[in-house]
Amino acid sequence: MRRSLVAIPLLFTSVVFAQTPDIRAQQIAAYAVETYESAMVDSLRELVKHNTVAVEGLSALDNPAHQAFKAALARQAHRLGLDFQDHGYVVVIALGEAEKRLGVITHGDIQPVDPSKWAQSPFELDETSEPGRLIGRGTEDDKGPISTALYAMKAIKDKGIELNRRIELYVYMAEESDWGPLQEFVKANSLPDLNITIDAEYPVVTAEKGYGTLSMTFANQPIDTSQPYLSEFSGGFFGSQIPEDASAVIQHADNALVAQLKSQAKQYNNMQFQFDQQGNALQIQAKGKSAHSSKPDDGVNAISYLAALLNGQRWPNNAAGSLVNFINDQLGTGLYGDKFGDIAYADDFMGPMTVSPTVIKGVDDGVQLNINIRRPRGKTAEQLDVEINQALDAWQIASGVTLAARHNYIGEPFVQTGAPHIDTLLAVFSHFTGIQNPEPIAIGGGTNSRLFPNAVSFGPSMPGVEYTGHSEHEFISRAQFRLNLQMYTAVMVELAGKTP
Ligand SMILES: [Zn+2]
């Protein structure tokens, strides 16, 4: 899938890349890394300490961890001689007085984390476990980029560059959980007319898939319990993470069934299955690999593969049994919804829609399945909604199971066509990476780019390199951190500096 998402030329960019960043931008970028590499790591170490995950029922405004994080940002901004404004959900750190502005969009909140899966605390920057890597929640998404932007601004300030655009670093505190407060902020405040988001990938992201969630409940139903049946099936952690863990319990698992499952388990060499027999109950723990759900091929979905392991028979339709039958019938281990009625589709530039079961939750009347979709342009939300419902209706008839609490949330894809700074960004990327003729790309993830005028994403991650944000092994390499400081410094000089 990644291949189809990367580096497919856009028709409207017939750009000649003779352009390189001017010598002043190169010099200040070099100065930034020579002078501030270790200070930038210190900054990140301080930001990572704060567990800025969203807490249900507690606004980011009242969350002590979010307040402490913003206080740390304020201290850093003051130390660097940058303006600091706290607008509640949004913090703006700025350099310069010009009326025109360049916005740099980031976020300070993080995704949930399972500390038991980390060598050290995810909230202490781990600089030693894996040489060359800075490991911690938020290092790549999106606290590392905040530290980088701060020191890019500091380097420009040191060099006394005259700015014809004030540089404004926006740090939003609920990007991972709730875009509502940012939408309100955007309505109430005037925004820069030129923006880069540093929360995705290089070289330049001009299209983002739409996010969606399909949820449905498999109800508790009486079944014949004298035969093998599934009494439990669970898995997943949060909606935008490809699940690493899943588990199932089979009652009345006889020796033949246990032997068949164990032998079949060996066929999946990307998965680990652990079998635990207590009396005639067999528990199976499945371990895959977590990843950002916009890049399902970076992970191994434990829910899909555990269901596949159990696909040797049709299970009695209690809650867990009908759930597993559904996953095998409609999803399988494919990533693109090919088995799910007619919903699958793809766009030449944006790639295919991805369809990933991510969270299974026990609810009062059964088990709720949540499927994360990431969709390109090419179908309206209405059409997709109809097709999803047709597939679910057909499955209900075929299986004799009635799904409860069905709900489809289908977000819109985003395509940026007008941004005037794409060529500058591509030129900086090409110069510092040595990658020739880079082209704009589309990604599966969604960023706040869509809320800011003329915004496109520029880094912080290299195309074709596994993205670790949202995973249980999040890091930024020291080399990438340095490279980002060079590129962000150069881009700010190019886009905001007065031509000498
Ligand atoms: Zn992010």
Image (cartoon, helix red, strand yellow):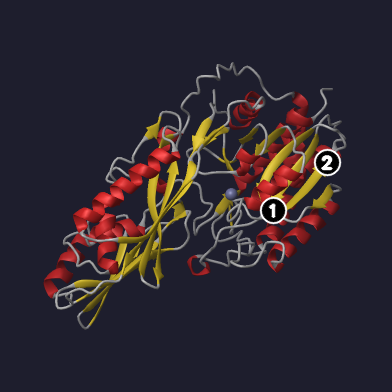
Which residue: 57% across, 36% down?
Answer: 202
- Residue 316 rendering spot, x and y as whole percentages: 19, 67
Q: What label does residue 95 carry, if any?
A: 2
- Residue 471 rendering spot, x and y as whole percentages: 49, 56
Q: Quadrant of residue 55?
A: bottom right
> Which residue, given by chain and number where applicable, does mark 1 sit on?
41
Q: Are marks 2 and 1 in contact (CB under 8 Å)?
A: no
Judge the density around disc 1: few (<14), some (14-19), many (≥20) Cα neighbours within 10 Å. many
> Does the beta carbon of the residue at mark 1 sit less than 8 Å from ligand 1?
no
Which residue: 25% across, 69% down?
Answer: 318
Q: Is residue 162 above or below residue 476?
A: above
Judge the density around disc 2: few (<14), some (14-19), many (≥20) Cα neighbours within 10 Å. many
With 200 as the anchor, is 373 left or right in this view? left
With 166 as the anchor, is 253 left or right in this view? left
Q: What quarter of the picture does the C terminus occupy?
A: top right
Tell which tag, 2 or 1, sits nearer the viewer: 2
With 338 as the anchor, is 350 left or right in this view? right
